[in-house]
Amino acid sequence: MTHFDKQRLTEIVLYILNKTKGLDYYHVFKVIYFANIAHLAKYGFSMVSDDFCALPDGPVPSILYNCVKGDQYCDKELQSMLDESISKGTDDAYYMLEAKRKSDEIYLSKADIEVLDKSISENANLPYGDLRSKSHGEEWRRAYAQQGRKLMDIVGMAKDGMASDDMIEYIKDNIAVEAALSW
């Protein structure tokens, strides 16, 4: 993940927190997930550069998850960006996040804002159980069943986002080009 990708992810989190006036990290992760699959289905590429992993309570953006949870595997640069921008709750409300500043929307496209606003309106206020059930789609089930790191597949997430067959082919072609260029 590049410096720009980390800054962009920080601004996405801030955008969500500013729109919702603060939110628990579980809901933040799911808002990002559903915005990301909507972005994949509509535009053919991910909104965020983070990998999504299938955890028991649903998909999470793995690098962001590690940083928010204070995990030892956290990316230190992203952690610093988040610490400067986001307040974490304490004691009984340790899972709550609040923005320390407004998001810098120069890092967000109109498409990003469109899918984020839709995901916020559909998911930010859902009860935990409903959001958990909603996030356990086909790709989550496939990834969660595998051994080791339960990495979710971009094509599978796009399918869960109701991408058309043409968009799925477009995404597959782009993955093949990226793979060829990475040699």
Image (tube, rainbow, N blue to C red):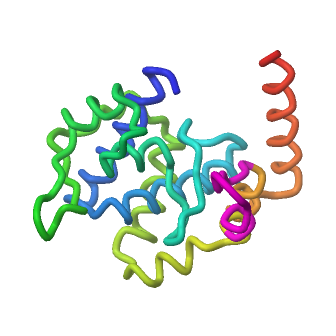
Q: Is residue 13 magenta?
A: no
Q: Relative to 176, is 111 above or below?
A: below
How far across and down, in percent of the image, does residue 6 sit?
Answer: 42, 30
Q: Relative to 123, is 10 above or below?
A: above
Q: Nearer the viewer, residue 142 or 176?
A: 142
In this image, 124 relative to 84: left or right?
Answer: right
Q: Nearer the viewer, residue 147 or 162?
A: 147
Q: Residue furthest left?
A: 91
Q: Nearer the viewer, residue 19 or 95?
A: 95
Q: Is residue 145 magenta?
A: yes
Quadrant of res 20: bottom left
How far across and down, in percent of the image, does residue 135 sit?
Answer: 56, 71
Quadrant (top left, top right, bottom left, bottom right) of the C terminus: top right
* Residue drawn at point x = 44 percent, y = 84 percent: 129
How far across and down, in percent of the image, does residue 32 sit?
Answer: 47, 54
Span highlighted in magenta in the image: 141-154
In this image, 169 relative to 150: left or right?
Answer: right
* Residue drawn at point x = 26 percent, y = 29 percent: 80
